Amino acid sequence: MNFASYAEDLGRKARSASRLLATTSGARKDRFLALAADALERGASPILEANAKDIAAFEAGGAAPAAIDRLRLTPERIRAAAQGLREIATLPDPVGRVLDSSVRPNGLHVHKVSVPLGVLFFLYESRPNVTVDAAGLCVKSGNAVILRGGKEALHSNLALHSLLHESLRRAELPPDAVQMVSNTDRAVVGELLQRVEHIDLVIPRGGEGLIRRIAAEAKMPVLKHYMGNCHVYVDRAANLDMAEKIVVNAKCQRPGVCNAAESLLVHADVAEVFLPRAAAALSRQGVELRGCPATRALVPQAKPATEQDFAAEFLDLILSVQVVQDLEEAIAHIARFGSGHTEAIITTDLNAARRFSAAVDSAAVLVNASTRFHDGFEFGLGAEIGISTDKFHARGPCGLQELCSYKYIVYGDGQVRE
């Protein structure tokens, strides 16, 4: 294969489709979402068969259970993906919204109007349900997208793309609005990252190595987060029953995702009571603890924690634990080791909650809730194409609004500049 020609063809088709989508009515885009949701539910069997092939190959390669869980599709996950498309359809069309307007002294009417970004190149690993979320969000926001999933999910992604492609055709939208890179050679990615004339934004979603490579090679802007080292801080004024429930959920509900907790911070005033009970609850879920000396004195089965452990995104049933003397030490620990993704505080002290929320520099801060809620669907965005820890142009879950830019449209009646 000529990778340069292949990448050029993908980019050219996407650019052409994006121009059509930019002026497509919201009703037609919503029709695509409804058709795709129905097609997913009707076509669940071949999707699951394709996914089974990917799972079998991944298991044979010795993949970890958490990685296999990220790859696995189930009837419930397919139904959730279909529901996600329907949720997106209920949201207002983000294209054409007047964000601001004014009338200048000379009579010019100045309007700031929301417009699509254009063409997105979206790279992601495992989790084939992301194929559906990305396609739905991009089409609804008027963007064409080139999808490149991981080779471990190729059969699953191709099966899903086939349904999406047919749904675009039935909705009378350009089928090239959603394209799938079917060649798994990394050289294709390298070629696409040079196509600045066709691609407006790259969004990588996966391991730190993948994201750093994309950020280093891309000629166009990249929206990203490198890793999700998320913390739960149990304050001296925490409700300990609540804290235990949240910590277990944040770590164990789905440990292989970026908003799972990787580090637990506990105020010294409650550590003696809280840590043994939390350790017992986590142990029942199979969690390995790696703690500071104060933690190990209270939880002897915990392994010694290194600085690398405190900085790690485990994506597994492993949790680092640090006892802190006060709120400020917790904030300082997060500033040193955190990744700017998601942090949580458990407390009944409103002043502590306010101080933590203001001082912690993160895309999302939760008070008395699990880090697992940092998610586009849970935040009411319908779905997300990823979570950004950047500060320009979007931060946190990237939904419809974050997939738009804006332009100024100015109406006059003959004004000229003196």
Image: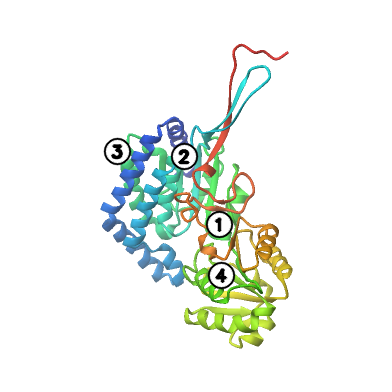
Residue 343 position by quadrant: bottom right
Q: Residue at x 61, y 72 (%)?
A: 238
Q: Nearer the viewer, mark 3 or mark 1?
A: 3
Q: Nearer the viewer, mark 1 or mark 4?
A: 4
Q: Nearer the viewer, mark 2 or mark 4?
A: 2
Question: Which amino acid is tagged 2?
Answer: Ser
The disc label shown at residue 252, or none:
none
Question: Which amino acid is tagged 4?
Answer: Phe
Could you tell me how far apart the alpha carbons at marks 3 and 1 are, in whole angstroms?
35 Å
Horizontal relation, residue 101 to residue 359: left or right: left
Residue hosting label 3: 170
Residue hosting label 4: 314
Callout 1: few (<14), some (14-19), or many (20+) C-alpha neighbours within 10 Å?
some
First reached walking from the N terminus: tag 1 or tag 2: 2
Could you tell me how far apart the alpha carbons at marks 2 and 3 are, in whole angstroms?
19 Å
First reached walking from the N terminus: tag 4 or tag 3: 3
First reached walking from the N terminus: tag 2 or tag 4: 2
Q: Position of residue 311 (x, y in %)?
A: 65, 68
Q: Position of residue 308 (x, y in %)?
A: 66, 72
Q: Position of residue 54 (x, y in %)?
A: 37, 62
Horizontal relation, residue 181 to residue 358: left or right: left
Scheme of image coloration: rainbow
Horizontal relation, residue 280 to residue 50: left or right: right
Could you tell me how far apart the alpha carbons at marks 2 and 4 are, in whole angstroms?
34 Å
Element on which disc 2 rests: loop
Element on which disc 4 rests: loop
Question: Which amino acid is tagged 1?
Answer: Leu
Residue 90 position by quadrant: top left
Residue hosting label 2: 141
> Quick one: quadrant of the C terminus?
top right
Could you tell me how far apart the alpha carbons at marks 1 and 2 are, in whole angstroms?
26 Å
Residue hosting label 1: 210
